[in-house]
Image: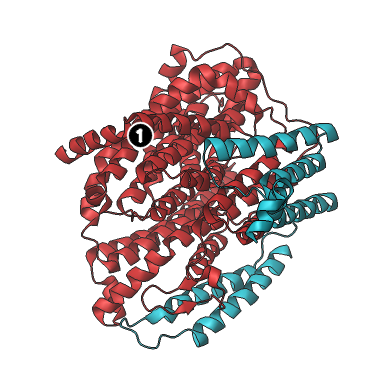
Chain colours: A cyan, B red
Amino acid sequence: MVDRIFAGVLLIVTLAYAVIAFTAISAPFQYDPLGPESWPQILSVVAIACLLVILWKPDAIKMNVARQTWFRLAATVVMLAAYSELYEPLGFILSTILFGTALSAMLGAGILRSVIFGVAAGVGGYLFCVTLLDLNLPFGELVEWLFEPSSTEGAS
Amino acid sequence: MDAVISGLATGFGVALDPFNLFLVLAGCFLGTLIGALPGLGPINGVAILLPIAYGLGFGPESALILLAGIYYGAEYGGRISSILLNVPGDASAVMTTLDGNPMARGGDAGRALSLSAIASFVGGTFAVILLSLFAPLLASFAVTFSPADYVALMVFAFASLASLVGRSTVKTLLGAVIGLMLATIGIDANTGVPRFTFGIPDILAGIDFLIVVVGLFGMAELLTLVEQQVSGKLKSLPVDKSFVKMADLVKCKWTIVRSSIIGFFIGILPGTGASVASAVAYGTEKRINDDEKTFGTGDVRGLAAPEAANNAAAGGAMVPMLTLGIPGSGTTAILLGALLMFNIQPGPMMFTQRPEVAWGLIASMYIGNVALLVINLPLVGLFARMLTIPQHYLTPLIAILAFIGIYTIVGNPFDLLLITGLGVFGWFLRKLDFSLAPVILGFVLGSLFENNLRRALSISGGDWSILVQDYKSVTLYVLAVLVVIAPIWLARRARRMEGDATSRG
């Protein structure tokens, strides 16, 4: 069943891909006999054939994921999305402290230990990557503003 | 032969440079640490660390040496969690658990670990020696390949991938096609026509390889860890003082030799990596040696076989990657992508155009093997400690590393969302028994496949029969058909023989 749903969704995407490949893509002038559209056309035909076989004979029946696990997974994805949204505004240190604490707390570490882990990962990670490895991580617009309000105002 | 010796001399010149030597050691050490983490296999380790290694701004040969060290080390480290925890880091380590874990439970953990380190060393070294002999030969032959031959080679690669990897042929094929389709996004290099970009400027140049790799492997792995997270810690068996005995080595000397050969040649087959090799080697040894039914209960030979094969395959997988530009496994596909990021086109010309990269990599594998043996025998207790890192710290750490890697390379917060999305997609694929290696292979090979097909048809002026005119391409198509049919035929024969046996008995 799950297989069929997944294959069905992929089939819709692939059909859209095929429609674009067969109608929209064309070169104004071209030197090679295939052009930019033939290869996607071939691929879409093969993909649709594979998907039809899966729809015809699915082999995964159930996902075998408990309801509680679904919640945990959804929460993880939400946290990841929030982490990516806050990465630049809050800066690496703050966002990592928040993310590290929240995720490790959800996965079963004690509150105090999660906070320690979060702070260690945020501050330690920043110092390690920026000073030692010379990588480029966001310092954070908010943090910058807090520390040096005058300079940011001056810049803007 | 002269070419090999002078090549090796160049290579060791590069690899023995103090900085590169340090990178080999650091990579091996880091790789072993990552491989030892429960549930994290070589492919995930390389995927998560690739952007960071790229972001450090080393030269191509140094970055590649570091990555290869990580890859190698992770193959080594994988056995630690297999033996002590009975949790394989990836598919290739599954066979190691069969006899390794019973040995550790029987109080021979130290013996099992040291034996597997030696078996890995022999397998790995054997593969590197063959690699340095074969690779230049194959490269000089591959120079004569025409675009049509390359198309045949790709068909062969995908055929062997579909028939040997994963549980379902159709799903593996579909995975590869998904990868190929992802690769078509962006501006077509030949005509400048944008394809599937929907006017979004970010993807005009195509989806970044790093994003696909980190998303599909790193983030999907993270979600799998969250899903499988069990309450309560995994119990790790203690590492004792026992050590491998001479008698063990004598007992499995031929096992190691046979498994190394099997591993290397299966590793060469494009698309099939260490997982198939270790399974075949274990199966072969079981058929030859299992007279007393000791396999699966802690037989030293059952431990040595997959370990030797696994590391030999890791070396073997480098052969098609370096000489043909077609990776032999998911992890080498990532290394190939790394080369492309440095504007080096792997393939037959690499040995003549960029000898310092090709040979430097090979030489670093010699050094890496020795280094791993030296690191692993005394420090195995330290690595075993890694097993006790609780999952609730490990999981956030993977996300933080992946984010650092992607942000430092691309510097665009939108890409962080993109890897999360790809991670969810990859998790679904894994959950539904698709393997992810074909996707990444398809993605890496996409433009090569398409360009060679178009070049071939340009030469013939649109006549498709050019694809089957050369003996080389015809041979490859025959091989492709064989590699698909042979397993089906063998399975059917095995079933028939079983049927005979039961009906008679």
SS under mark 1: helix
Residue B37 in percent (x, y) is at 62, 34
Q: Which chain is home to disc 1? A: B
Q: Residue beneath label 1, please?
A: B364
Residue B294 falls in image quadrant: top right
Q: For label 1, count other residues whose C-alpha is less than 10 Å away and answer few (under 14), some (14-19) or many (20+).
A: many
Seen in the picture, residue B447 relative to A15 is either above or below; the reply is above
> What residue is at 47 percent from the left and 28 percent from the top?
B289
Seen in the picture, residue A30 relative to B355 is either above or below; the reply is below
Q: Quadrant of the N terminus of chain B?
A: top left
Residue B79 in percent (x, y) is at 55, 30
Residue B251 falls in image quadrant: top left
Seen in the picture, residue A24 relative to B331 is either above or below; the reply is below
Q: Nearer the viewer, residue B153 or B76?
A: B76
Q: Is residue B178 at all visible to an observer of this figure?
A: yes
Question: Residue lying furthest left in this view?
Answer: B2
